[in-house]
Amino acid sequence: MPDNLRSQTITQGIARSPNRAMLRAVGFEDADFTKPIVGVASAHSTITPCNMGIAPLAMAAEAGIRAAGGMPQLFGTITVSDGISMGTEGMKYSLVSRDVIADSIETVCHAQSMDGVIAIGGCDKNMPGAMIAMARLNIPAIFVYGGTIKPGHLNGTDLTYVSVSEAVGQYSTNEIEESMLSAIERNACPGAGSCGGMFTANTMSAAFEAMGMSLMYSSTMSAVDSEKAENTTLAGKVLVEAIRNQILPRDIMTRDSIENAISVIMAVGGSTNAVLHFLAIAHSAGVPLTIDDFEIIRERVPVLCDLKPSGRYVATDLHRAGGIPQVMKMLLAHGLIHGDCLTVTGETIAERLKDIPAEPRSDQDVIRPWSNPMYATGHLAILKGNLATEGSVAKITGVKHPKMTGPARVFESEEACLEAILANKINAGDVLVIRYEGPKGGPGMREMLAPTSAIIGAGLGDSVGLITDGRFSGGTYGMVVGHIAPEAFVGGTIALVQEGDEITINAHARSLQLNVPEAELEQRRANWKPPAPRYTRGVLAKYAKLVSTSSLGAVTDLS
């Protein structure tokens, strides 16, 4: 082991006797005091199916660490269920939990002078929270994804969590009976694991595999298959070896490796949330990255995978088709990722991919051949204009009408908008505006899955636009634009929109424009007053004071 183990400050320091006595109480024996102390950050919880299978994985990680000569120290970190809190006030805590997770892992690892950390997470914010902490700590680290859920089934159709949200919209327009809505709800989520499409959890896990911070093939494994536990044991062993060789996160999380991750996100049709999270991860790693960099990468990377929410398949299908390594090899063969980037194993990306063919197998159609992609360019576009001078994020592939101009329908909250949709008060051609849901204004930047799914379910997905300073679930698709910055709460132009104003969303031109004369906007701006904070105490109040604009990743530690 290296001479500079952080844990030796505890096990062999000036206050040696009381420190060693405490460690003996938790299982240390004489020979263990020279071993590296390795944190196992477990996000196990029965709050959500995403995390309910993590406890056995934490035990598997401990076994791997012990077998490799390390001393594992298990500790817990939080999770919230985005799916269960969706559409409620509780969703305001979702993005907040990303920073609570990061802070908690950083706190424990620094306080206990740990030599390395393996983090095991499931629901959406577990992944970026852990990665932000790893970048801050810069001690050897590896991430293990708790695994994806298998699809539900009903009448020969695969179901996901999003299927239920869309069914609510179908029921509201009498397209389906209540019995069918109930059947979809009962069958959509069959057990443990994170939401099955290329939604946020699977997007981020895939990106971490591409970045080299997780083992290859691990991001698309099912939560309930035996290979997940076996892979977690291996991850524990790999981490101890990384400690021996002092392979540090910031050696791995470089500008090039983050570009690799973004390229894979584009190729698999990943979540809009990835933009927000990678801006925050890059900030923590000290890597220059701007929202405009996503647009540069989008223009050169095709969408190669036919995955939900807008496609046909789920993550377990992608796993059987070759997983993220197959996608990466295709990108590498065409010069779209950097093969010399280091991984946590000590090998480069190119070395890890050397035995994988440059084209996918012909007996599957989850991963399309290079000559026949789903779309020629990426799907996550950065839109700017007088409605979003700092930028906004939209999924633009698969949209039937990439340019839309229509009257604004203005709502001051997600709930008010959903109520109007379910009451059939929205017309084709409308552009819905949901504001005061940004990082500071919400606070917490809620995801708008309920209204967007209701729009799809009501048959308006191709004819209605929606813009917001909030976020979207990874399960969202359609003509929707989120992360509008500056947000309404700080006086962004979205705060000045009035009912009936004409708004143009132009995906091809990557523009978002309020078609109101500038003189009129200046008059409105002069009359606008910031609303009172919605919360004055507790974590949401603290978050609102600290959080940055979404165009910088909604981080809470800007200097």
Image (cartoon, helix red, strand yellow):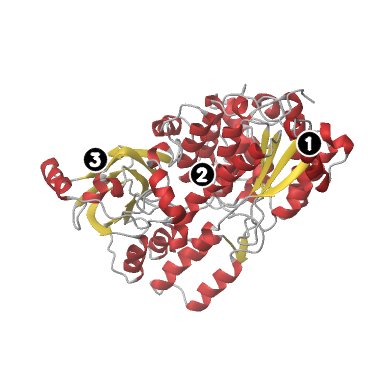
**In front here: 21 or 302?**
21
Q: In which quadrant of the rendered image does the N terminus lie?
A: top right
Q: In which quadrant of the rendered image does the C terminus lie?
A: top left
User: Residue, x 81% and y 43% (percent of image)?
Assistant: 21
| Helix, strand or loop at mark 1 | helix
196 relative to 541 in the view: left or right: right
**In front here: 457 or 387?**
387
| Helix, strand or loop at mark 3 | loop
Q: Residues within 10 Å of mark 1 (few under 14, many from 20)?
A: many
Which amino acid lies under the numbered mark 2 shown in the image of this protein? Gly
| Helix, strand or loop at mark 2 | loop
Q: Which comes sooner in the sequence, label 3 or label 1?
A: 1
- Judging by the rendered image, the residue that carries numbered circle 3 is 386
User: Quick check: marks 2 and 1 in contact, CB under 8 Å?
Assistant: no
- Judging by the rendered image, the residue that carries numbered circle 2 is 270
Q: Position of residue 490 (x, y in %)?
A: 29, 45
User: Quick check: marks 3 and 2 in contact, CB under 8 Å?
Assistant: no
Q: In the image, which disc is placed on residue 237? A: 1
Which amino acid lies under the numbered mark 1 shown in the image of this protein? Lys
Which amino acid lies under the numbered mark 3 shown in the image of this protein? Asn
Which of pointers 3 and 1 indicates the residue nearer the eye? 1
The residues bearing labels 3 and 1 have C-alpha atoms spaced at a distance of 52 Å
507 relative to 228 in the view: left or right: left
168 relative to 392 in the view: left or right: right
The residues bearing labels 3 and 2 have C-alpha atoms spaced at a distance of 27 Å
Q: Position of residue 343 (x, y in %)?
A: 66, 29
Give the vertical position of 299 relative to 490 (above or below): above
